[in-house]
Amino acid sequence: MLTDVIFKANDIRGVVGGEAAEWDVAGARALGRAYVEVAGLAGATFVMSRDMRTSGPVLSQAFAQGATEGGASVVDVGLASTDGLWFASGHLGLPGVQFTASHNPAQYNGAKFCRVGAQPVDAAFLVELKTLAMQYDVDGAPAPVATPGTVTTQDVLGEYGSYLRSLVNLDGIRRLKVVVDAGNGMAGHTVPSVLGPLNVEVVGLYLDLDGSFPNHQPNPLEPQNLVDAQKAVIDHGADLALVFDGDADRCFVIDERGEVVLPSTVTALIAAAELAREPGSTIVINTITSRSVAEVVAENGGQLVTSKVGHTYVKALMAAHGAVFGGEHSAHYYFRDFWGADTGMLAGLHVLGLLGHGDAPLSDLARQYERYVSSGEINSRVIDQQAMMEKVAEAYAGRGAISWEDGLVVRGDRWWVSLRSSNTEPLLRLNVEAADEATMAAWRDETLALVRG
């Protein structure tokens, strides 16, 4: 079974099992066969991995069965974070598929795709994949080819850890105490390999893999999922905390006071360091990244490119402009030297390196990049999202510059309001930023009243 709701703007994601199921093993098999044909992989090889979700083994095996029946061979690297799959794709020179539902609740699973070298697939690819997979799910796939593909296994975890460390200057850093909250997700699998050889003391929270997420949901964008790490930093006198989402491609940072370092601040911090290393380079951000990043890039002589929200859009611009680094306010961080792909773990290593080579606490390091007040992302369930955005645009006509490059954006001299549809959930997402708390709160509250009133 496959339902069309699982096909999102950037990937596949839906409920598995139960009365509310949106796809199943048979659907995964049809998807695998369609993937081979759409990607032109008959007689070729791709790499596949999965996160710790309980449905991952059966879905990935069914997908591999459909793919081999279509003539493709599979290199299965087993359990991996999503950036571990990007690494495998780049390292092995193969297209890839990662079975994950990222930060979604336990009953979800999904798939992310990339071309050779972790390059993104485009919207046309996903549309064609949806059409053919749903056709095969209803009518049945063609008979297996005369020479089916094979499935082999390979472990790349050690090479992944070594490669990430090679991209950051970590020699001679002072001893750091780091809280790591994996949320029972894939960071529990990758942290020992990446951080183990470094001069850091790891205080681990929920490092055991458990797809039922018994401690908290694997979504660090929700403040309640950061509370345990914030408390642990204080209790253990740690220098910082790194909090990962379920597939560990996103990383939130918490300073020594237990305060969240906003992802836009982390973006500015790393951007300044990368521009010092490569003056004049290009940095990619998205439409809801803080204005402080644009200011920092300009002050450091860099070039700025703005993308729509979503990893496929950012990756495409990273490649098109040869950008050295990219950051999103959702805590996705992209690196040219990591095939232009996103990796939360590498972002965490950059923060460790910058902190460990100086004596100042993280709060002092980050303060120079914290120039605006942000609302954080606020979600509302709305039946007709486009109509609601148009309603807000009409209400704000004449009060700011209105654009539609990524949903609705209204900009003033020292403030902006962004209202856009989620790429993965039936939600309208609000982000507001201003130079002071009162201005931000006023625009936030007025917009929410229009959306929810």
Image: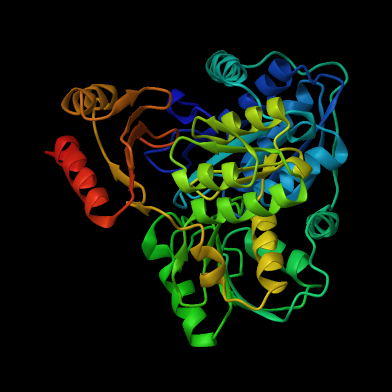
Pinpoint residue 165: horizontal percent, then vertical percent.
80, 60
Q: Quadrant of residue 68?
A: top right
List x then y, in percent, for residue 171.
83, 70
410 or 250, which lies in front? 410
| Residue nearest the viewer, comparing 365 with 408 | 365
Camera-nearest residue between 357 and 3: 357
Question: Where's residue 410, x and y in %?
Answer: 31, 31
Picture layout, residue 176 above or below residue 37: below
| Residue 205 visible to an observer of this rendering | no
Q: Residue at x 64, y 33 (%)?
A: 315
Q: Quadrant of the C terminus?
A: top left
Q: Determine whether 428 is above or below 44 in the image.
A: below
Scheme of colours in the image:
rainbow
What's the residue at 78%, 44% (across, down)? 337
- Residue at 86% x, 34% y is 93
Please give left or right for residue 168 compared with residue 453 in the image.
right
Please give left or right for residue 307 compared with residue 147 in the image: left
Residue sitting farthest toward the left: 453
Q: Position of residue 377 (x, y in %)?
A: 36, 47
In the picture provided, is 182 more to the left or to the right than 202? left
Residue 218 lies, with reference to residue 47, above or below; the image says below
Taking the image as drawn, is residue 399 in sight? yes
- State the count of labels: 0
Q: Is residue 380 above or below residue 224?
A: above
Q: Please state which of residues 144 and 45 is positioned toward the viewer in this rendering.
A: 45
